[in-house]
Image (spheres, rainbow, N blue to C red):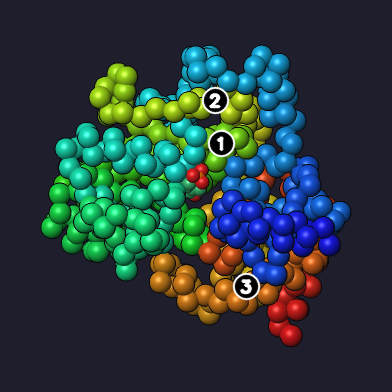
Amino acid sequence: MKSRKLYDRAKRILPGGVDSPVRAFEPYPFFVERGRDARITDVDGKEYVDYCLAYGPLILGHQAPPVAKAVNAQLKHGVLFGIPNELEIRLAEKITKHVPCAEMVRFVNSGTEATSSVVRLARAYTGREKILIFDGCYHGAHDHFLFGKKGAKSPGIPHVLRQDTIVASFNNQESVEKIARKNELAAIMVEPVMGNLGCIPPEDGFLKGLREICDDNGAMLIFDEVITGFRLGLSGAQGLFKVMPDLTTLGKIIGGGFPVGAFTGRSEIMKLVAPSGKVYQAGTFCGHPVTMAAGLATLETIERKNTIQKASYFAGKVAGILERELGYNVNRVGSLFQVFFNDSEVRSADEARKSDNVKFMKFHRALMENGVFASPSQFEVWFTSSAHSAKDLDATEEAISRAAETVRK
Ligand SMILES: *Cc1c(COP(=O)(O)O)cnc(C)c1O
């Protein structure tokens, strides 16, 4: 097996054999050779229907023709200049056209950079330091948000940061109110649909409640829509749930498969960003022309075709098959879903953590053997794209049915 050999070689030179922890799983991850539409092929020639889709960005599937065309055209013009480029304006205009809270945009290179920059902006705007986040939400790999109820999620995070990051419970407005009363909050930061501990939707009124708490306390409401932006609708989760945040972070889909992040919001706040204001933010690769071209081609396609509805309809089909074959609940919002190996419904981080990841991974392995690849953890989500076809659905149904049988044995 070429993959196994490559993994052994990788482990000698890359920590854990990978460049992002979730990619490593037992006994070894496959190494990918290529992807097209909703299918990927590994270096051993095995093909899979892909429900990981690079953890979210590829809503048009692999090698989407409009994206490939736009990228190739940009390659002929040069890849990077560090000089303003019209594509930055065009992509920003697309974002401000669709995302309700967006009036101005700053492009960065990853979701992590977007969230670390937006927190500085919220602090500068409010003149306050404390940030409220939610147990189980993920806002990137930097120091400010890697906290859970029990403290820092990683060694190496300065202790002083702990005082300024307060962790509340998702779908529990009371826990937020209590904290907001006792602390001068600069911001409440939330994934409007939790997508990094499986899929956990907000309960009715929860996001509206956060809006009211922020209004009552002078705190900024920040939606981290790195996953949900342009996936749950052109207007994202804020459009779907009709709640207007002050600021929003974006990433994944808006780069069309290239590294990207962005933060956006009301002009009055965004104008504080350098060089129009004093809040420092900068980057060699920010507004990268190839990324901008790929992102623009992606958003133009989503606007023209019923990409989002198509991906969502397909997700509904797969979710139904998972529920039927496994007998567990599937949480789904649009084209974002997860089946929880859990006898009760999952509405919170604590409930999600009670799920059986060992059993999930057994299922995952059987799925892979039968030609289906989803994110390799109970605590990630499945994604669908507009490239998933009826043939992919048939193959998926058969694979899920066989894998479910393996798990029952
Ligand atoms: C993926 C993700 C991030 C981090 O984005 P990167 O591009 O991986 O740095 C931040 N927030 C959410 C909600 C995400 O899903």
**Amino acid type assigned to the residue bearing label 3 in the image:** Phe
The residue lying toward the viewer, choosing from 143 and 201, is 143
**Residue 366 in sight from this viewpoint:** yes
The residue wearing badge 3 is 360
Percent x, y for residue 219? Answer: 21, 44
Q: Nearer the viewer, mark 2 or mark 3?
A: 2
Contact? badges 3 and 1 (CB < 8 Å):
no
Q: How many marks?
A: 3
The residue wearing badge 1 is 259
Percent x, y for residue 397? Answer: 77, 64
Residue ID at (67%, 39%): 60
Residue ID at (16%, 38%): 127
Residue ID at (31%, 64%): 151
Q: CA distance from mark 3 to mark 1?
A: 30 Å
Q: CA distance from mark 2 to mark 3?
A: 38 Å
**Local crowd at mark 2 within 10 Å, few (<14), some, or many (≥20)?**
many
Disc nearer the start of the sequence (2/1)? 1
Contact? badges 2 and 1 (CB < 8 Å):
yes
**In the depicted structure, whether residue 269 falls above or below residue 140:** above
Residue ID at (38%, 38%): 248
**Amino acid type assigned to the residue bearing label 1 in the image:** Pro
| Horizontal arrangement in the rendering, residue 258 relative to residue 33 (left or right) | left
The residue wearing badge 2 is 288
